[in-house]
């Protein structure tokens, strides 16, 4: 979810700004980066698809 994604970013940025980024985070960084990238691409696409399908349904009626 978008909230979970934002919460994750907020936590990471908070840790970084406090200078206490935990080593336990490091192995997961590629996964976090991939998750954020996929999210950034998927959310606008999902919204676009939703708008198109909504218009299609409205015009069909």
Image: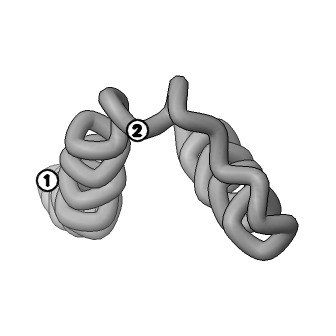
* Residue 7 left/right relative to 51: right
> Dot 2 corresponds to which residue?
26
Q: Verify CB contact (< 8 Å) between mark 1 and mark 2.
A: no
Give the percent coordinates (x, y) of residue 44: 29, 68
Give the percent coordinates (x, y) of residue 35: 29, 42
Q: How many residues crowd around disc 2 within 10 Å: few (fewer than 14), some, or many (20 or more)?
A: few
The residue closer to the viewer here, 5 or 42, is 5
Q: Is residue 49 above or below residue 2?
A: below
Give the percent coordinates (x, y) of residue 42: 22, 53
Q: Residue furthest right?
A: 18
* Residue 58 left/right relative to 60: right
Give the percent coordinates (x, y) of residue 23: 53, 34
* Residue 56 left/right relative to 15: left
Q: Is residue 11 above or below residue 58?
A: above
The nearer-to-camera label among 1 and 2 is 2
The residue closer to the viewer here, 13 or 53, is 13
Q: Residue furthest bottom?
A: 17
- Residue depicted at x 61% and y 57%: 9
User: Could one spot residue 33 in this view of the protein?
Assistant: yes
Q: Is residue 49 above or below residue 17?
A: above
Q: How many residues crowd around disc 1 within 10 Å: few (fewer than 14), some, or many (20 or more)?
A: few
Label count reads 2
Dot placed on the residue nearer the N-terminal end, 1 or 2 = 2
- Residue depicted at x 20% and y 47%: 34
Corner quadrant of residue 55: bottom left
- Residue depicted at x 64% and y 38%: 22
Q: Determine whether the residue tagged by mark 2 lies in a helix, strand or loop.
A: helix
> Dot 1 corresponds to which residue?
60
The residue closer to the viewer here, 22 or 6, is 22
* Residue 60 left/right relative to 32: left
């Amino acid at each position: 979810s978008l909230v979970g994604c934002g919460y994750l970013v907020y936590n990471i940025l908070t840790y970084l700004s406090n200078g206490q980024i935990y080593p336990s985070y490091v192995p997961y960084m590629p996964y976090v980066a991939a998750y954020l990238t996929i999210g950034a691409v998927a959310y606008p696409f999902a919204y676009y698809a939703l708008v198109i399908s909504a218009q299609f349904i409205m015009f069909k009626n």
